[in-house]
Image (tube, rainbow, N blue to C red):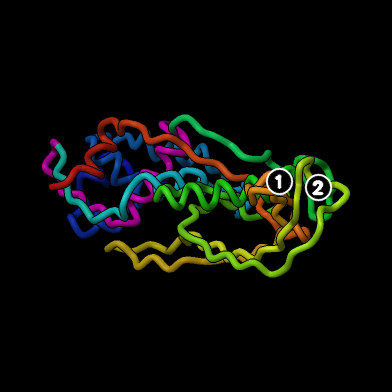
Amino acid sequence: KILTEKQARALTEDQIAKLSPSEKFDLMQDDYEFSFTSKIKRQNPSNRPDWEGVCHGWAQASIHHEQFSPKTFKNKSGKVIRFASSDIAALMSNFYARIGGGRVSFLGRRCRENAGNTRISCADMNAGAFHIVLTNRLREKKSFIMDLDPYRHVWNFPVVGHETRVLDERAPHQRSARGTFKEILVSTKLYYAQETGPEWNPPLRVPGFKDYWYWLELDQSEKIIGGSWSDANHPDFAWASEAVKIPSPYSAFITQP
């Protein structure tokens, strides 16, 4: 239930601190009609699947910004509004998801089928291309985002690291890319940033991980020219977005005091 203006104006500083991120955002702008909160409620009806959300916005916020520190503002009415680290993360996630994401580059397409489907969109990310993107981006100290679920659900996470080991070697397969001199089987442990629950101060980032096994096709100079997954355990797609200029009032959350 959305607060009335009378109820909102009667709130103490401690009561305001316990409001939702969207309610605080409205009060920060002296919006006692809570128009932003009303919009968020319309965008998130109670009958939506519980796994849906704005993980694509959260992932972008995670790769473009350091962890958010708590901030305090005073609106024109004199109300003090304290934002927790997770309040700001939620608002910036919504910004990137629905308002201001930058230009996006994709590797692979989204699979919209259930487990076991063999449609091309569910197996179109080439393992060789994946390995090149993974190693090049992280070597340049640039993160990117991956959908870790290979089928219809989308679970976007920012990639933060990897460990790769060579396990085996074989002659080119019949379906190998033209020019393949040999294939090597590699095991890659991919580390990604995990979501956390609400925290007032920036939470400690504990990475999650996924293990992948795949063959890399190499030419005579050992350059990667293709690849194939050793099983159905693989990402659905990978992507990265360009940084954008953050407009007001969101810019207040990332400005240093």
Neighbor class of circle 2 (other Cα within 10 Å; few <14, some 14-19, many 20+) is many
Which residue lies at the image location 18% right of the left edge and 55% below the top edge? 12
Q: Position of residue 182 (x, y in %)?
A: 75, 55
- Residue 190 in view of the camera: yes
Checking the image for residue 226, the label placed there is: 1
- Which residue position holds label 2? 176
Amino acid type, mark 1: Gly
| Residue found at the very far right of the displayed protein | 174
Which label's residue is closer to the chain start, 1 or 2? 2
Checking the image for residue 38, the label placed there is: none
Amino acid type, mark 2: Ser
Which residue lies at the image location 47% right of the left edge and 34% below the top edge? 98
- Residue 112 in view of the camera: no
Which residue lies at the image location 41% right of the left edge and 31% below the top edge? 100
CB under 8 Å between callouts 1 and 2?
yes
Neighbor class of circle 1 (other Cα within 10 Å; few <14, some 14-19, many 20+) is many
* In-front residue for pair 111/127: 127
| Residue found at the very far front of the displayed protein | 220
Q: Where is residue 71 in the image (x, y as percent from the top left)?
A: 20, 51
Q: What stretch is highlighted in magenta?
A: 76-101
Q: Where is residue 42 in the image (x, y as percent from the top left)?
A: 51, 37
- Above or below residue 21? Residue 160 is below
Q: Where is residue 153 in the image (x, y as percent from the top left)?
A: 67, 50
Measure the C-alpha gap from mark 1 to mark 2: 7 Å
Badge 2 element: loop
Describe residue 217's horizontal placement relative to residue 175 as left or right: left
Badge 1 element: strand
Give the total of numbered labels.
2
Residue 78 inside the magenta-drawn segment: yes
Residue 54 inside the magenta-drawn segment: no
Describe residue 16's horizontal placement relative to residue 86 as left or right: left
Which residue lies at the image location 39% right of the left edge and 40% below the top edge? 37
